[in-house]
Amino acid sequence: MKTLAMTRDMIEAMNGLQCHIFNSAGSKLLAHGIFTARHRYDFLSNFQGIMPTPEMSNKDDDECRLALKQVTKELDDGVYKVSVLTKYEGAYVILESPDLNWENKNGFLESRVSLQALGIRTISEEEYMEISSMTYEFDWSKLIIPTGCSGTGQADAFEDLINEIILSESNGVVNYGRIGTGVDRARDGQFEIDMASWLPKVNATTRWILQCKYSVDKNTSLKIDEIYSEMIKVLMHKPDYYLLVTNRKITSDFIDWFQSDLMSNTNYYIPYKKVLIQREELESLLMKPEYSHLKKKYFG
């Protein structure tokens, strides 16, 4: 049987860890955040050297203030279920909040709860791994075409999203340019990266060609023939790198081909380096707090 002291220790071990935020029914993952907790016992311990007595620390109303920071999606005031995972004294442990009303305060979600009301239990390693790997489900078929989009279709919105990601990752990106529809010649964008911004001793830039491939159905496979024909067109631009970004399904055959030297059994030698960013990598990136504005803009 867990005592309040044990509960406090477990919660302390979870401070600063990633949490999963679900709807009130617990059936849909809405966002991730960073879990923090502070309870009355801590406050009394740190306030002018006052040490709480056993009677004070074991009150039934031993209240704990919870805060969820760096939430990956803007959430309004409401009822949410929250879970936090950790390994405590060799066991896998999950904290599950009861139905709490959370208040949005400057981007943080805050709530208060009795320590005894928090559900903390041990789980198997399989459960731990399953919950840890849960991610927000992006519905690419409902990609939003925001106001000010460069075009009228979802493919245009996808290109805009990728362009915003690249520019927000600016790390030395210079001479960035979008290529208009119909005249792209296998380019959706082109830019240079000033290597001196990464390696001060290297006074040179690298030329990049960007290509975006979007599909309403994320299970549509990216075809080798389709991309190879585009890569041949790219030769005229003499890039150092070719960046392919897609939300489509990528087969192992495609990856093997893309990572090869592309000389075997082909008529064209592809001299530039190739970089592939897949849907899973995009989604992982969009789950980071610094991209929450893009997640909201394009997925709601």
Image (spheres, rainbow, N blue to C red):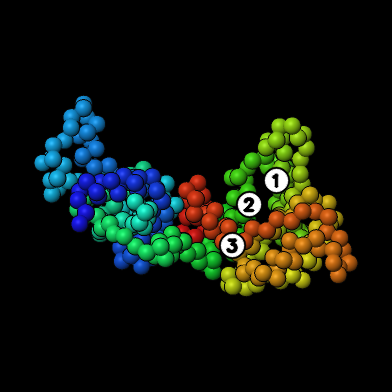
| Residue at left offset 89%, top offset 67% | 267
- Image quarter (top left, top right, bottom left or bottom right) of the N terminus: bottom left
**Is residue 269 or residue 8 the one in the foreground?**
8
The residue that label 2 is drawn on is 163
Q: Residue at x 70, y 68 (%)?
A: 254
Classify 10 Å Cα crowding around label 1: few (below 14), some (14-19), many (20 and above): some
Other residues around mark 3 within 10 Å, as few (<14) / some (14–19) / many (≥20): some
Q: CA distance from mark 1 to mark 2?
A: 9 Å
Q: Type of residue at label 1?
A: Tyr
The answer to which of 263 and 11 lies nearer the viewer is 11
Please tell me whether mark 2 sits on a helix, a strand or a loop: helix
Q: Nearer the viewer, mark 3 or mark 1?
A: 3
Determine the residue positioned at 37% across, 54% down: 90
Instruction: Check contact, mark 3 vs mark 1: CB within 8 A.
Output: no
- Pointer 3: what residue? 279
Location of residue 71 in the rendering, given as x and y in whole percent from the top left corner: 41, 50
Residue at 33% x, 65% y is 26
Q: Is residue 157 left or right of residue 230?
A: left
Query: Do the residues bearing badges 1 and 2 touch, measured as CB atoms within 8 Å?
Result: yes
Residue 124 point in image, percent of width and height? 37, 64
| Dot 3 or dot 1, earlier in sequence | 1
| Pointer 1 or 2: first along the chain | 2
Res. 260 in view: yes
Q: Which mark is residue 176?
A: 1
Residue 75 sits in quarter? bottom left
Residue lying furthest top in this view?
48
Q: At label 3, which amino acid type do we have? A: Arg
